[in-house]
Amino acid sequence: MRKFKLFFIGSLFLVSTLHAQQTNLQRAATILQWMKDTQCDSIYACFDAKMQQAISSSQLKDMWTQVEQQLGPLEKEKEWKQDAIDGTVVYYTDLKFQRAPLRFLVAFNSENKVSGLRLLPVPPEEKPLVAPFDSTHLEESPIEVTTGNYKLPGILTRPKGKAHLPIVILVHGSGPQDRDGSIGPNKIYRDIAWGLAAKGIAVLRYDKRTYVYGKSSVPEGKEITPDEEVVEDAVSACQLAASLPFIDKRKVFLAGHSLGGLLAPLIATRCPSVTGLILLAAPSRPQDDILKEQIRYLGSLNGNTDEKLLAQQYQQIKAAAPQIYWDYLDKYAPVMTACSLSIPMLFLQGERDYQVTMQDFAMWKLGMFGKTNATFQSYPTLNHCFMEGTGKSTPMEYNHPARVYGKVMEDIAKWVTQE
């Protein structure tokens, strides 16, 4: 009996060791596999102290047996996802049993121990929160932003029958984004366009070159830089906007979000038709500093604090773009470039933003100190997409239906239309 006990303890130690070497998403999938295989002792070994007090290994086995008795055999397992509930990151998959679906949900503590395990009804699918388009007073028409051989489809939104309009050109953040700034069920650039148009401002937005052309966004044999990704097409869009007959050429504003905000001062130096800048969640610090900070933050949400793993993630992200891309950003000085401009600038920042933080906002403020052409506004409850939330911001909240906070459009419109 003693030998068996020693072997059992050794097995649990091995299970715990293997479990610790996985990512939380992998751990959650392993827990489900053990549940299906009725390896409930293995699951119990990964519980934290509270969970071990709350439920026994035999109760785990009974729980799964009862589910199959009531709902029939498991037929399909959907992809794993993660979300945040009251600030706790959870991992879940939807399971289709013969007679009904259930959601299998696992949470972990900072020591990678299971702190929560539940089988729940699958909630109804969330629908996007879309403000109705006011077709009575607004109109949208297709446009095309052209840079050399690159043609990018887009949309112009404006009040019907109005002339001498101010115009805002929306410039994307990083990644291959469409004209609407689609992320999950949300469309942040469309929200901004419709919100500003309702306040008497024309808005031009377009599909990003990397969204339309992918790897063909640069000529064969050339490596991409932020010029090809963002700057060249933004200049073309601003020139197109300024040429429209119903636009007030004294009020041509470029609104850059994230990477677009970082590059907005540079774009303005190359396009004299731009008469003002709106920088939405614009980075001001070296990209390496921001990238490492983001990786550590996301790692802390998942309980992953291993420096080697974080370093690997950093290298993987860096490898996604050529070195010339990062060298370009390293040489570019956004705050100094903004300081050299005399046109008015509006800096907007969500205080819950973990991608571009209040530290970036503070550096813009410091760099623009004494400049009467700079205006600053931050919002305590908003994230990187300028959508409301509570607690720590996480990537998962972008997947929940939301709209850009109305006060953001109000503040932009008030600033743009002031004399």
Image (spheres, rainbow, N blue to C red):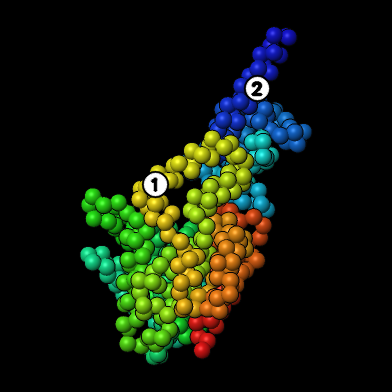
Rendering coords of residue 145 (x, y %): 30, 71
**Residue type (three-letter) at the residue carrying disc 2:** Leu
In the foreground, 296 or 201:
296
Rendering coords of residue 136 (x, y %): 44, 86
**Residue type (three-letter) at the residue carrying disc 1:** Ala
Query: Mark 1 near mark 2, Cβ–Cβ under 8 Å?
Result: no
Q: Is residue 392 visible?
A: yes
Circle 1 SS class: loop
In the foreground, 278 or 129:
278
Q: Residue at x 40, y 90 (%)?
A: 164
Which numbered mark, 1 or 2, is in the foreground of this view?
1
User: In the figure, is residue 65 to the left or right of 230?
Assistant: right
In the foreground, 121 or 135:
135
User: In the figure, is residue 46 to the left or right of 285?
Assistant: right
Residue at the extreme right: 53
User: In the figure, is residue 205 to the left or right of 383?
Assistant: left
Q: Which residue is mark 1?
A: 320
In the foreground, 179 or 331:
331
**Measured along the vertical axis of the image, is residue 389 above or below residue 15?**
below
Res 70 → quadrant: top right
Return the mark for residue 164: none
Return the mark for residue 12: 2
Rendering coords of residue 249 (x, y %): 38, 85
Q: Residue at x 55, y 70 (%)?
A: 368
Rendering coords of residue 97 (x, y %): 53, 41
